Image (cartoon, helix red, strand yellow):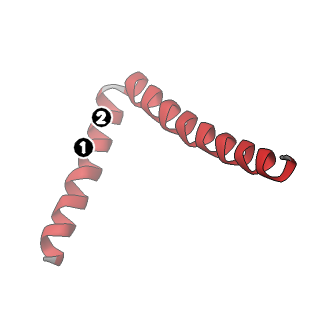
Amino acid sequence: MKLVRRIVVVLIIAFAVFYLVTRPQDAANAVQGAVGAVWGAGVAVVDFFVALAGG
């Protein structure tokens, strides 16, 4: 089972590198979208706790 997991990880990394090399602008947009989603989730959690503490 470890071999299958290792093969899957290598394939995912290979695809990511291929995508980065062949479509750098699209890869940058994907990373920006992911970072934006994580940032938005963090802001929402902070807003929740601020509202919880204040109300």
Q: Amino acid at mark 1?
A: Phe
Query: What is the distance, in whole Å, between disc 2 and disc 1 at their CAs?
Result: 6 Å
- Disc 2 marks which residue? 19
Q: Give above or below for 20 relative to 1.
A: above
From the viewer's perspective, tell me whether residue 16 is left or right of residue 48.
Answer: left
**Mark 2 neighbour density, 10 Å: few (under 14) some (14–19) many (20 or more):** some
Q: Give above or below for 53 relative to 22.
A: below
Q: Nearer the viewer, residue 48 or 15?
A: 48
Residue at far top of view: 25
Residue at far bottom of view: 2
Q: Residue at x 74, y 42 (%)?
A: 47
From the viewer's perspective, tell me whether residue 5 is left or right of residue 16.
Answer: left
Picture coordinates of residue 52 (x, y %)? Answer: 77, 50
Helix, strand or loop at label 1? It is helix
Picture coordinates of residue 16 (x, y %)? Answer: 31, 43
**Mark 1 neighbour density, 10 Å: few (under 14) some (14–19) many (20 or more):** few
Marks 2 and 1 in Cβ contact (< 8 Å): yes
Q: Nearer the viewer, residue 41 or 55?
A: 55
- Disc 1 marks which residue? 15
From the viewer's perspective, tell me whether residue 9 is left or right of residue 3.
Answer: right
Q: Amino acid at mark 2?
A: Tyr
Q: Residue at x 20, y 53 (%)?
A: 11
